[in-house]
Image (tube, grey):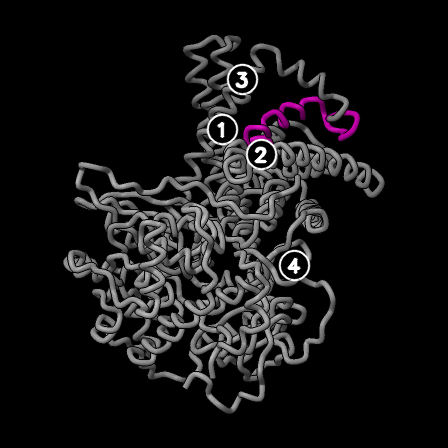
Amino acid sequence: MREPSCHTTPSVTAPAPVPGTGRRTLVLAGNPNVGKSVFFGALTGTYVDVSNFPGTTVEIMRGRHGEWDVLDTPGVYGVGSFNDEEAVARDVILGADVVVNVVDAVHPERDLFLTLQLVDLGLPMIVALNMTDEARSQGVAIDRDLLEDLLGVPVVETVAVEGRGFEDLLARLAEARPGHADHTLETDIVAMAAHVGSRASALLVLEGDETIAERYAVAPGSKRDAIYSRRRDRVDDIVGHVLTTTDEGLSFSARLSRVMLDPWTGLPLLGVLLYAVYVVLGQWVAGGVVGITEEVLMLGYWEPFIQSAISGVLDAASPLHTFLVGEFGILTMTPTYLIGVILPLVAGFYLLMAVLEDSGYLPRIAALADRALTGMGLNGRAVIPLILGLGCVTMGTLTTRILGSKRERFIATALMAIAVPCSAQIAVIAALMARVGGVYAAAYFGVLIAIFVLIGTLLNRVTPGVSTDLLIDLPPLRLPRLGNVFKKTGVKVWGFMREVALFFLAGTTLISLLDITGALAWIQRAAAPITVAWLHLPAEAATAFVMGFVRRDFGAAGFFTMDLAAPQLLVAMVTITLFVPCAASMMVILKERGWRYLLGLFAGSIGVAFLVGGLLMRLLEVLV
Amino acid sequence: MHHGGAQGPHGGNGRGGMFGRGRGRGRGRRSLEGTLAALRQGDRAMIATIDDDSARAQALRFGMGEGSQISCVTTLPGGPVIVRAGRQEIAVGRSLAARITVDRACEVTDARA
């Protein structure tokens, strides 16, 4: 399990220019939360995820605009190797013919650091000064003409979410050019470029980028501090010239930010928020909406309808009948869970997530959670992948790229794969738990949180290496734009449900096959020592665990038709949650962490699941 | 007021690695006196040294590099110190804050003027 101390860079297929086609590559670059993804959508006609916190554009989005190949990059504060996202952004940017640098007009002090680094890299570029309307309403004015003169590249004002400024941007794209770089670097860059072939790579080597240095077999430079300091001075100088602020008093958003960060008010506020999430998702959606969609719509109308329709054509004893409308049928169970149970909760979850992201509250939660997460070898920043993991573990695992060390990615991935249920799973579990009352639902989350803390603390002890410390910026709070929130929710839910549907279909096919061939009965007998003797569950529980290999929510759904006592249900839900991550996230884990990690996690999660399940059952038998 | 002097003790550790760490966290308690971790709400100070290679670079990106004027927005007990540099707010984890020395004597002079 020993991890090499040196970091690795995720392989990115470099956007190699396509010879002969005359297509050129346009790369969008910018800090996190600046609206790059909206630009991408506007340029290519495809809407992608737009977020207000670091780390959502985890995959490189590609699209086309006329003669241009358009590539999006993860939001980064600079180009380098500080984390895997930066490395991804760096490699994409190095392959650009033109860089469109999106700058948030609300905080140019932060964003222009990246801008000047891009300028120093010597790439042809154009700056989109975004959210100028919001900046103006906050009393921040930026002299666009002067900024353009000082940077030496075209600067265009935009309000991306409202589609303003794009014509201007496109009209001036041809003017994209290298800007006024730090002239004191020239001699060194020219000398280094003779070894590494390009000016951009030369600068990165001088800044001590080990990956690039290794690529060209040269020694990384040691002048990063000096280069960065001078760049910071230039940023401050430029900002001093182009920026005028009119409102020095604390705005409402600044005051709210104080309230959120002060532990005396911030923690209760977070508590209220979590309770509100529970009421909305756990009671209104899981109780109310699912009650209608699942029981009335799907079980009341759809299933009897489709069953009688199919029975009219097929013999009820035939395998095809079982396959289509049997207990696990692809026309009965699959649509009932997908539409009746999972869809409402997943939609509710992503809607809340979108509001949370767009408001800028997440970095504040990260600050509040930092102390607790430090004990688990993580820092506050890990709340972002962890919260995303509550939506979808696959998404969360990809987002561990924003973490600063391999050690943190190791721990966060394991925690998510074992102890964080995804939204679809919570949906099924909430629907099941509705039968047994609030105490058991609370116990379910209590046990999971305890396991989460336990595993985190343990991994912090045994994982080699050193974790990084929290160092994040807290962007200004914003009122989420409803249009963006709904658009984003729609895209996320659609993408998520498509994946779930695929795996549910594959899973039901598998289970039906096992059922028809009699393999299921054999597995049930073979697993009886664990399911019956150790977990004190019915023998059919083995079916649910087999389903759990496909997806954990699918596995949880397997318990629906069983007649379980309340303690049995709790044990079943805890065990299936801790059980192996879904097939999709296992594939991502394999890609991001390697097969040894996956094997360890696979064995570990099964071990933990059955160990905790059995112990919990014994505890409950004493208590109840 | 320049950065040159502040970097002296750190330039020569020869690690230069992106994830190279000068110190492990939590090992060996040092006095918090004169560090960012000792600041209270409303305190103003100048960042003197940042004893962490990657944090020093990241801090420069955020505008709180060595030599910058900062003020303490708030502190979370046992948790991060929230700092304001210019118009930027930055959360600094406690053990990192303990490795950032500050110069409070400079609070009246503006280092970046």
- Of the residues under marks 3 and 4, which one precedes in the sequence? 4
Mark 1 residue type: Phe
Q: Which residue is mark 4?
A: A374
Pointer 1: residues within 10 angstroms few (<14), some, or many (20+)? many
Mark 3 residue type: Ser
Chain bearing tag 3 is: A
Question: What is the secondary structure assignment of the residue under circle 3?
Answer: helix
Locate residue A58 relative to residue A418 in the image: left or right: left
Highlighted magenta segment, given as a residue range: A531-555
Q: Residue at x 31, y 52 (%)?
A: A198
User: Label 1 near label 4: C-beta < 8 Å?
Assistant: no
Chain bearing tag 4 is: A
Distance from Cα at disc 2 to Cα at disc 1: 11 Å
Q: Please tell me the numbered disc located at residue A552.
A: 2
User: Label 4 near label 3: C-beta < 8 Å?
Assistant: no
Pointer 3: residues within 10 angstroms few (<14), some, or many (20+)? many
